[in-house]
Image (spheres, helix red, strand yellow):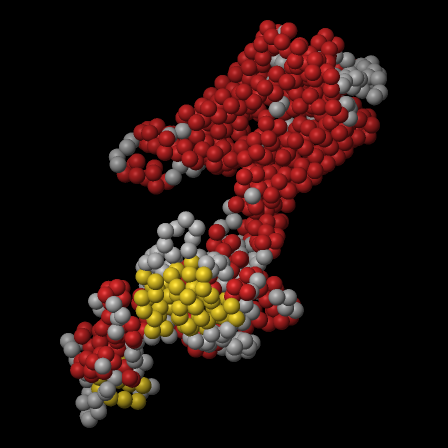
Amino acid sequence: MGASGEAGVKDIVDAFPFIADHVSLLLGKAASQLGVAAIAMVIALAVAVPLGIWLGHVHRGSFLAINVSNVGRALPSLAIIAVLIAPLGLGRSTLIIALVVLAVPPILTNAYTAVDGVDRDVVDAARGMGMRERDVLLRAELPLALPLLFAAIRTAAVYVVATVPLGALVGTEGGLGDIIVDQASYRLPGVLGAALCVAVLALGVDALFAGLQRLVTPRGLRARIDYAAVQTEASAY
Amino acid sequence: MILAQSSQPVIPNFGAGSSCERENGAFCWSWVRDNWSDVLWPALREHVVLTLLAVVIGFAIAFALALFAHRRGWVERPVTITTGILYTIPSLALFQLLVPFTKLTTLTAEIALVSYTLLIIFRNTLAGLRGVPDDVRESARGMGLSRGQLLWRVELPLALPSIVAGVRIATVTVISLATVAAFVVNKGLGAPIFDAIQRSVFKTELFAAGGLAVALALAADALLVLAQRAATPWARAGRPA
Amino acid sequence: MPPADTAQTEAAELEFRDAVKRYPGADRNAVDRLSLTVPAGEICVLVGPSGCGKTTAMRMVNRMIDITDGDILLGGRSVRQRDPTQLRREIGYVIQQIGLFPHQTIGENIATVPRLLGWPKARLGERVGALLDLVGLDRTLRERYPSQLSGGQRQRVGVARALAADPPLMLMDEPFGAIDPINRERLQDEFLRLQAEIRKTVVFVTHDIDEAIKMGDRVAILREGGVLAQYGAPEEVLTRPADDFVARFVGADRGLKRLALSRLSELDLDAVNGRRPDLRLPAGMTVRDALSEMLASAGSDALVVDDGRELGIATLDAVAGLLSRESA
């Protein structure tokens, strides 16, 4: 379980022909990596978003929401995978459960702070105009909370995609990580090529979600989007 | 899965230890007791050293960059983009990509770990410095504080909570990723984790090493919260009576 | 209040000499050839509508803003020749938001400039205590943090901090602008009492003409573009506005405002001669307030008393007489 030391800079150069020659293998592994990440993200979102939004809407549970994140952020990813393997065994589901455990805290906390932090005057005005509670949430709070919420989702998505390869380290399905840890089969150029692909994949997911984040931001708030991102990432990990 | 290239040969000790260990029970205290001083404690110590070194070096670099960006605004963008990319590259990939340059050394591990601290510390330091209220800065200048005095006596103390928050996040991030560092250098709590996987998923060792890493992260986090409180007595002062 | 340690440095004369500020790219000057002299120990209020350059003019004095042309002399020395940080340590500076350092105690805040000047510790401690007394704050507040103080207390700390190194000149930029009206009046009165004691040269910026008239030994009215419209004692500005702009700026009620500048004791009082009006007013009351009282009592005369001594009878005619006397 480790990389080989017999490496030279030349191997980095050889990584590119490897990538060119193994497009379908790499795409397959990338797809499986994204697949595992997507399953984990869907579960994490289903748990964390409604709970966070609801807590934020009623302005309750700040202690829970903030501390879940503080503890969750501190959890070491590989250690969590290891600890879960002990009772659950090696397997895709163990990895997915670990990823969910790691992704829920930042999403939950930021969903909470996003809704909780919506300008109280705006919410007051919405109520004052006679909006029902459901409309206050759907038409005032959520649109204003979306940029921050998406910033959190973006952070979590990148984190999850980046963590899947660790699965390969402990012998479960790890997408492109399967290649990185298998130098016996793929030789060093293959390992480096896969590492490059993992890096590109993570950056690509980040860019994709950055675009989504921009799309969901109401026009009037766009100038503030960078600020929202700073806020989330500062509190996400 | 490839075979380990750890310094000492791995001898599965199923059969050597207690019946709990032979049957790979859920958690065997006897193994922890027997292997604390030879396996777990050294790994924990190495983990702490790896982390401290990375945070200290990362802080020095990111802090200097933040001070520079505070003076010259154009610096922020290129630094944020560069450190942001480093931060986004998955750890396993970054460790592996460094191997051709710096081989399987502690240096490789540290370069990667340091690179994960930069974005957070840089951004939090800069945000803290920029968050100093204009009127405070104005009155400081008006009383004749030089730029250096303004920075060291006013701006940095006021930025301290944000800076420590950044160090806190960076520290737990490094503790997390330092487990992965065992992929390139047989050190830290990642080493017993990989060892346990090799030994047909030896549960006790997995649980003990993983648990130690989690405990270390939570302890470091709590310690830094306390440090933050101690460093900012004014933040705890109450409202007017 | 112990006068200890408060007035060592002589107040200094301040002179603007054709001072000009022009921002790069602006199509006209922010301050336009401003010339005026503030005699040592007097309060000069710079007042005018927003955009008249009053704050800019003030900030050129301690070089928070650099002069484009002309000069400013403090105690006869050009500020342009001075190192800005050294210069600023010799000039007290109070701004509207106060800008206390949130991470330092009140004592540390007040000691800022003396510490920069390297005063010994014992002298710092003494000075902080004396200043807290001077601005009417309890000495126990020195260990508190700014967040623990009320707005009025913070403003007093701001003034104490500006006075700490006993500067020959104080610059005050709308120092009471963020305080509610009742406390503002109290702080104004306190500052005037303080000034009577310490006799600093003060440049005071405000947009409020009433505050300008109350606080100023001299009032400089600036119009847009940083042009000095009139410079003189408050009475003069009220009595003989230099032009329509000044007349409009000081307001149609400038007659009433003038009454606020005089005390009852300054009126031509009638002899008491056995008359006993029900309305008794203290001699130290402003004529404006007295007039208001007299009108509220259906135009009654008032017996003016000073510490129980009856000085005479104030009448509406006497009030009118005061106005005609001064405008003559």
Residue located 80% across and 26% down the image: B39
Task: Residue C271 in the image: state x and y as whole percent.
Answer: 22, 91
Vertical comparison of B241 with A196: above or below: below
Quadrant of the image occupied by residue B202: top right
Vertical comparison of C148 with C258: above or below: above
Residue located 67% across and 41% down the image: B60
The residue closer to the viewer here, A97 or C291, is: C291
Task: Residue C317 in the image: state x and y as whole percent.
Answer: 17, 82
Residue located 34% across and 58% down the image: C225
Vertical comparison of B102 with B74: above or below: above
The residue closer to the viewer here, C272 or C72, is: C72
- Which residue occupies the extreme left position in the image? C298
Residue located 59% across and 51% down the image: B151
Vertical comparison of B38 with B231: above or below: above
Quadrant of the image occupied by residue A199: top right
- Left or right: where C321 falls relative to B103: left
The residue closer to the viewer here, C46 or B137, is: C46
Quadrant of the image occupied by residue C307: bottom left
- Left or right: where B160 falls relative to C17: right
Q: Is residue B181 visible?
A: yes
Q: Is residue C181 visible?
A: no
Looking at the rendered image, the quarter that the N terminus of chain B falls into is: top right
The residue closer to the viewer here, C202 or B176, is: C202
Task: Residue B118 in the image: state x and y as whole percent.
Answer: 63, 35
Task: Residue A146 in the image: state x and y as whole percent.
Answer: 42, 29
